[in-house]
Image (tube, rainbow, N blue to C red):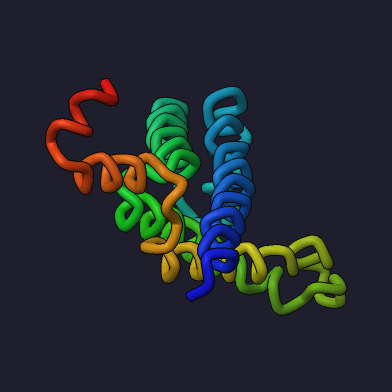
């Protein structure tokens, strides 16, 4: 691989990761500042009754996941869980996804954005080893240094 291409791949993955993390982050913040809205969404889309305390717990868990995704911390786990969270959303909103023009009065064209977002999460997960501008990438580069060099950087 050419050195020029080598530099563009991590940059592209950083951009993808940043915007996917912001996307996920806004949902976690909503659960924390609007727990009743989260309960309403849980009831209408997932068919479960979500108490306010559970909304806060899910918000905190999703906030931790969003930050791990944002910083590329434990890439396999955080990218995989992020993909899983969004996959569940895609599955439970299938009616809206297959009615993008609202003909059956269940969806709107805004739901179509769920597909490319899912594709972004899938692509990021599949390319996680090339996403090196991350906490994991930094830790790997530090462990690759000879011991004297690694300690002198502290």
Q: Nearer the viewer, residue 67 or 152?
A: 152
Q: Nearer the viewer, residue 104 or 142?
A: 142
Count of numbered circles in the view: 0
Locate residue 153, reporting x and y percent: 28, 25
Res. 84 image quadrant: bottom left
Who's the residue at 59% across and 64% down the image? 4
Locate residue 127, reporting x and y percent: 44, 67
Left or right of 39, for residue 102? right
**From the viewer's perspective, is residue 36 above or below residue 43?**
above
Left or right of 40, for residue 97? right
Q: Quadrant of the C terminus?
A: top left
Res. 134 image quadrant: top left
Locate residue 87, reporting x and y percent: 49, 65
Does residue 92 appear anywhere in the picture? no
Who's the residue at 55% across and 58% down the image? 7
Locate residue 47, reporting x and y percent: 49, 56
Left or right of 106, for residue 69? left
Does residue 69 appear anywhere in the picture? yes
Left or right of 26, for residue 70? left
Who's the residue at 69% across and 72% down the image? 97
**From the viewer's perspective, is residue 103 above or below residue 20?**
below
Residue furthest to the left? 147
**From the viewer's perspective, is residue 63 above or below residue 104?**
above
């Amino acid at each position: 691989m050419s050195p020029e291409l080598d530099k563009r791949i991590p940059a592209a993955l950083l951009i993808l990761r940043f915007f996917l993390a912001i996307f996920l982050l806004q949902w976690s913040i909503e659960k924390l500042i609007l727990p009743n809205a989260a309960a309403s969404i849980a009831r209408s889309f997932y068919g479960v009754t979500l108490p306010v305390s559970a909304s806060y717990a899910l918000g905190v868990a999703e906030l931790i996941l969003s930050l791990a995704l944002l910083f590329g911390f434990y890439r396999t786990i955080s990218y995989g869980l992020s993909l899983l969270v969004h996959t569940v959303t895609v599955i439970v909103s299938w009616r809206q996804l297959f009615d993008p023009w609202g003909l059956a009065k269940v969806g709107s064209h805004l739901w179509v954005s769920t597909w490319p977002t899912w594709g972004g999460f899938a692509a990021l997960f599949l390319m996680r080893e090339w996403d090196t501008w991350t906490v994991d990438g930094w830790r790997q580069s530090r462990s690759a240094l000879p011991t004297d060099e690694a300690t002198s950087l502290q």
